[in-house]
Image (cartoon, grey):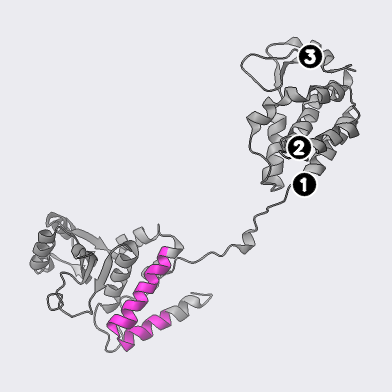
Amino acid sequence: MTPDQIIDDMRGQLALRRPRTYLGGLLPAFCDFLIEMDSPGDSFADFEDFVRKHPLVTVGTSTLTVERNGDPKDVMTIRPAYNRIHNFYLFQEKRIGYPRSEPYATGKWADYKHWLDALVTFSAEQLQEVRKKAIEHMLSVLEKRAFDPSKVVIDPPVFLMLLERFPWDQRAKGEPTGAAFQAMVFAYIRADAPHLQVETRKVRTGSARLKGIGDIDAWNGQRLTISVEVKHYTFRTEDLEHCDHFVEDVRERGALGMIVAWDYAKGVADEVKSAGLVPLTIDDLKAAVRLWDPVKQQAAMNAFEWAVIQKEQSPGLIGRYEKFLDDMASPVF
């Protein structure tokens, strides 16, 4: 076979109803393998002549493997050459339609001994030409699927930005103390437990008056699942003493009780744990939210906005939130 006849044969195999696409890698790998074996300088008559000098290894392998010059300690296999071509198509040239079947492809080498009969007689230039034409044909028939990073839209972690940058220590005229902080905790619970019905109350509205347990309650049907007391200050032992009814109500209902505070005085977090509650600070929420995906972050942001505008309805707080959004959109924020 001439170089052009081998290329034509490969093209015919690729045009079958069930194309043998792996041949677009196997043929160039044959060429690389023979060049690495210095085959062009040995004037072989055919493949059998080649294996007389470089005996086949048939035990423990299905790929083309030989002992170079009959030395069992110097073994050469076609697999590295094939892997290079395989990776070239898939990763460098982005031809994702090329089969990811290296063991299968190299294991089919014996079906193409008629190619090898001709290839071992070729010069290095002819082998390079066959390799080049085989690769060019494969690149022409396999569709390129390049990933364009410039088209990726990266959404910012908006809720984490709120936690870290909103001026929690400020308050507008007429804005209830702790309203923004409670809206934030509600938003956290709402996004973190989308399977529950989460309710929040306006700040300074007693939960008992509204038949609730905590400042924020999360329900599974009629069963209370999570109840949260929100404290926008450093929580102390005397504050826990004022939570006796909350502790008892949570225990009776078998709910998960939380106290989310700005911070805890020394040792008080342990006292909260001893009471059967989970003590959390804004730093704990930040640590959790850093692991959230952008969709969950946006869900929390939407919940915060709802609580501020629809539940609290404080013009001062709404104004502060709108200013925060404007500042966040600024390139220097």
Camera-nearest residue between 99 and 214: 99
Comparing labels 1 and 3, the label whose residue is closer to the camera: 1
Q: Position of residue 187 (x, y in %)?
A: 32, 70
What x and y, as percent, mark residue 108? Answer: 70, 26
Residue 33 quadrant = top right
Which secondary structure, mark 3?
A: helix
What is the spatial separation of the Cα atoms under label 1 and label 3, in whole angstroms? Answer: 34 Å
Q: Please tell me how crowded label 1 is: few (under 14), some (14-19), or many (20+) other residues with Cα within 10 Å.
A: few
- Determine the secondary structure under disc 1: helix
**Residue bearing the label numbered 3:** 51
- Taking the view exactly as shown, the residue that stands out farthest to the front is 17
Please name the residue shown 72% across and 30% down the image. Answer: 81
- Please give the residue where the numbered disc 1 appears in the rendered image: 141
Residue tagged by mark 2?
A: 24
Q: Position of residue 231 (x, y in %)?
A: 21, 71
Cα separation between marks 3 and 2 = 24 Å
For the N terminus, give its image quadrant.
Answer: top right
**Magenta part of the chain:** 296-324
